[in-house]
Image: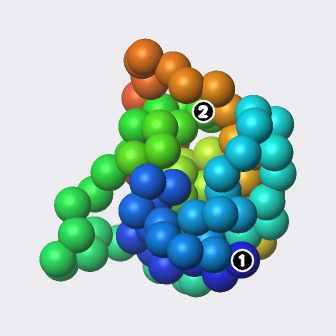
Amino acid sequence: MELECWDSIQSLKGEKAAKLTGPPGKKQRAFCPKDCDKKLPDKEDVIYGTQFYSNLSMICKAAIHNGKINKDKGGEFTIVLGTKAKTFYGTTNNGI
């Protein structure tokens, strides 16, 4: 599934949203383009979490933060759905 730099689980619609809906543990392969670490002029930077991320977080930015993809190349990785959490702890990692 190809994502845009600004996509979050909450913002996805249609077929993409359906692929990221389901029980905890469900897996989905995803691909992000390069340069998703950059600030987008018309989008608010949103990333909540470390290792486990809120559904509000930009998926590609979270993948860079977690070290799953390279910011200069983009890449493919696996999204694993988790359980709902009340709190997400933030850190700075890989420049994010």
For the point 40% across and 37% down, which residue is it?
48
Give amino acid for label 2: Phe
- The residues bearing labels 1 and 2 have C-alpha atoms spaced at a distance of 20 Å
Extreme residue in the left direction: 42
Q: Earlier in the sequence, mark 1 or mark 2?
A: 1
Extreme residue in the top direction: 86
Q: Is residue 29 above or below residue 91?
A: below
Give amino acid for label 1: Met
**Label of residue 1 in the image:** 1
Name the one closer to the observer, 77 or 73.
77
Secondary element at tag 2: strand
Q: Is residue 79 visible?
A: yes
Q: Is residue 92 above or below residue 94?
A: above
Secondary element at tag 1: loop
For the point 65% across and 81% down, which residue is it?
2
Colour logic: rainbow
Q: Which residue is mark 2?
A: 52
Q: Is residue 73 above or below residue 61?
A: below
The reply, left or right, for residue 58 in relation to residue 32 is: left
**Label of residue 10 in the image:** none
For the point 42% across and 18% down, which residue is it?
87
Q: Position of residue 58 (x, y in %)?
A: 44, 57
The reply, left or right, for residue 46 in relation to residue 34 is: left
- The quarter holding residue 14 reads bottom right
Classify mark 1: residues with Cα within 10 Å, few (<14), some (14-19) or many (20+). Answer: few
